[in-house]
Every structure is written in C-alpha cells, then in structure tokens.
Image: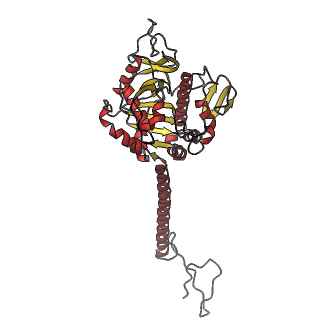
C-alpha cells in the first residue's frame, strides 16, 4: 500500500496491483502531517529555534546600537583635566561643603570663536571670555533648584591664576569675567568660591555651537517679543510677537544687548533667565526625559559641546547628576541674579549689594529655602516688599527673579 499521507486531496488512485484503491487516509484533527503528530512537533521545534535565534539577533543588534550610541555620547564630552589639576593645588583654600547631598554646579557660557561654527561670531584672538555664568544649586532633597546669574562686570577679588602659557596673574580687584579670560575654568571657580564661600562640586562649559544645537534638538523654544529686534551684532531681526526660535535665533536673543530693552546687562540676564525657564518648560512638557527618541538628539547636542570636570565627563556622571532633577516641579526651578548695583567708582561696572548678597550665598551654602518674585524690588535690595506693612513676611527671604513655571509671554 502506498503512503499517500501529505498528498493533496484529489481523485482516488488505483493501487499498484490494479485492485481497488485504498481509501484516503484520515487523521484526527490537530495531529499534523502524521498519525503520531511528530511532524508538526518537529516543525514547531524548528520554528521555536529560529524565532529564538531571531529574537536573540534583534537583542544583539539593539544592544549593539545602544552600546554604539552610548559610546558616541560618552565620547562626545571633553574632560577638563587641566582645571581639575589646578583646583587640586588649592584644595586647602577651597570651601568645605556644609549640606550633605546638595550640589553646586557652575555653568559657564564661553564666547570663544574657536571650534565648530563659532568663527562667524568674530575673530578668534586666542582668548575667551564668559558673558554668562550661572551657579546652579540643587537642594539635597532634590525638590528645588536655584540658578543664580553672576554679572560679568561685577567687581570682585580675583586670585592669582595660572594662564595658558604657564605664567601667573597677580591677585587683584577686577571685573568678574576677567577670571575666565585670564585663567579659564579653574580661575573662575576659585573666584566664585572666594566670593560666595560655596563649594563648587561640578562645572560645565558650553560654547555657541553647543547652545544652538541644544535648542535645535528640542525643536525650538517659544518666546514673546514686546518690541521688534534688529541687532546686527547678534545676527537677529524679528518683528514683535510670539516666535519659536531656532538655534541661531535663540543664540542671538540671549546675546543681544543694546537693541533690546534698556540695553543693560541686567536686562540681558533677565532675558537669559526667562529663556532658560522656557527651555526647561519645553523639555518637561514634551516628555523628552522619558522618550529615548527625543532624548538622544538632546543628549547628543549637549554632550558634543560640553567641557566638564572629570566626574561629570561621562554619561554615567551626567545621569547621576540629573536623575533626581526630573521630579522637581517647574515652580521650584528658580532663576535670579545676585543682588548688585552700579559700582560707585564706575557706572559701567557693578558691585554686590550687602548684606543681601551674603544672605543669598549663606542660604545656598546651607541649603536653606528662598523665594523669588518677578515684582520690582522695593527699598530692600533683595526685592522683598518689606516697605508695605500690609504684606505678610515670607518665611524665607525673597529675591527678584522668576521660575520655570512662568513664561516669556506673560
């Protein structure tokens, strides 16, 4: 008898003897291609093996892509070993941290014309200055963050600093941004620590190209212009109204000075703070931190332009820093400028207002709470409306500033 198992259904075939054909073979439902079900079992085993191998391959590919991406991002960051070595020489003079778990990060915006895409903003004269310096304080409980702008023209005591050619500057009383021009990051950190008595735990330096890339990575940042801008130096021309600024426009917006507002550095710092608040809002509202597809270009833009202390010069280091920041409410992300006024001997320079500046530094140093308000300051230079007896005093001192919960279009 011929085995017809597996043959398509069709007319009956005569057997080899010419006798009556055998009836077609029938099998119970679900037994596969053989009476014992061994065929389907073999096919299932083969299918499972190939599926497992395919899944393993996908995992390996995904892992390879993830590892390649990790290595790329990790390799983007420039490690500032020179600053670390210089700071180590002065470890004994540096402040002692007072609040366990709190962290202070110095953010420096470099105006260097060297590097990718920076030459069009002017000639590279071999030096760099910092028009933007922000001391970011992260509370120990990670329930608040306070960013304090330090005016570039405020008069402070500069320490003796090592210059790029190995020579040293003399200690002197001069404008703040000379520290970065003379001795780079290490000199700036030592100057901030001397002025505030706050230990700087980490630092980050970002240039023009890095700032633009960050804005591009989040698809622009929305601002509101109450008056048109036409600033040739900042490469920016915009009508009044609401705008979503791309990277180039955003850079011009935060750099512009004389063509916007009252032309003062104070007005520019306020604008920078409002822009950063809008950027924080954009990142949080778009769930960038929780969406790998959105997060990768932001990380790539950020890491490609960052120069940091060795402890932060890796994705692991940056992750440890920002891990606890994701849950800070936007109303607790505060921006303000250190209290200051025109320098008594030069109206083009600033000086700290005491005791308000010292009170601010003390509260940051001890991780004590403070509040900000967008109201114009009254007689109290912190901006606290102490002159109005109808107001209930705040349990924490109030300084003029804004939060990330606000918008630039209010």
Q: Position of residue 118 (x, y in %)?
A: 59, 41
Q: Quadrant of residue 382?
A: top left
Q: Which residue in the rendered view is the most extreme toward the bottom?
A: 17
- Camera-side residue of 186 and 125: 125
Residue 388 lies, with reference to residue 336, above or below; the image says above
Residue 212 lies, with reference to residue 275, above or below; the image says below
- Camera-side residue of 256 and 382: 256
Residue drawn at x 54%, y 88% is 1
- Camera-side residue of 142 and 159: 159
Image quadrant where one finds the C terminus: top right
Coloration mode: secondary structure
Q: Position of residue 335 (x, y in %)?
A: 48, 26
Count of number-bearing discs: 0
Q: Is residue 105 visible?
A: no
Q: Is residue 200 visible?
A: yes
Q: Quadrant of residue 266?
A: top right
Residue 289 lies, with reference to residue 195, above or below; the image says below
Q: Position of residue 362 (x, y in %)?
A: 35, 23
Residue 304 lies, with reference to residue 17, above or below; the image says above
Q: Position of residue 160 (x, y in %)?
A: 39, 33
């Amino acid at each position: 008898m011929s085995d017809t198992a597996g043959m398509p259904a069709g007319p009956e075939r005569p057997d080899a003897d010419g006798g009556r054909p055998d009836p077609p073979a029938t099998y119970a439902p679900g037994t596969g291609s053989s009476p014992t079900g061994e065929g389907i079992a073999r096919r299932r085993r083969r299918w499972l093996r190939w599926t497992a191998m395919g899944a393993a391959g996908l995992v390996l590919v995904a892992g390879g892509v993830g590892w390649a991406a990790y290595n790329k991002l990790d390799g983007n960051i420039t490690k500032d070993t020179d600053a670390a070595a210089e700071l180590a020489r002065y470890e004994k003079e540096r402040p002692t941290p007072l609040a366990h778990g709190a962290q202070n990060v110095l953010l420096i915006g470099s105006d260097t014309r060297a590097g990718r895409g920076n030459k069009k903003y002017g000639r590279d004269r071999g030096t760099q200055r910092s028009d933007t310096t922000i001391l970011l304080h992260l509370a120990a409980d990670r329930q608040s963050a306070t960013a304090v702008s330090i005016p570039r023209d405020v008069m402070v005591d500069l320490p003796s600093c090592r210059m790029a050619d190995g020579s040293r500057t003399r200690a002197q009383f001069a404008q703040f941004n000379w520290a970065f021009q003379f001795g780079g990051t290490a000199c700036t950190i030592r100057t901030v620590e001397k002025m505030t008595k706050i230990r700087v735990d980490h630092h980050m330096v970002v240039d023009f190209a890095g700032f633009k890339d960050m804005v591009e990575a989040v698809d622009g940042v929305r601002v509101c212009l109450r008056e048109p801008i036409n600033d040739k130096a900042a490469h920016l021309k915009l009508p009044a109204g609401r705008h979503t600024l791309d990277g180039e426009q955003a850079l011009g917006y935060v750099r512009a000075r004389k063509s916007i507002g009252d032309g003062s550095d104070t007005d520019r710092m306020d604008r920078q703070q409002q822009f950063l608040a809008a950027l924080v809002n954009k990142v949080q509202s778009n769930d960038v931190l929780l969406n790998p597809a959105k997060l990768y270009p932001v990380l790539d833009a950020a890491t490609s332009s960052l120069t940091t202390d060795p402890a932060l010069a890796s994705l692991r280091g940056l992750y440890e820093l920002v891990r606890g920041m994701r849950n800070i409410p936007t109303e607790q992300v505060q921006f303000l400028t250190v209290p200051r006024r025109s320098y008594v001997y030069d109206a083009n320079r600033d000086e700290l207002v005491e005791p308000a500046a010292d009170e601010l530094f003390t509260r940051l140093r001890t991780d004590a709470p403070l509040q900000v308000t967008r109201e114009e300051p009254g007689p109290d230079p912190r901006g606290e409306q102490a002159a109005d007896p109808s107001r209930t005093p705040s349990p924490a001192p109030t300084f003029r500033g804004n939060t990330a919960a606000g918008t630039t279009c209010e």
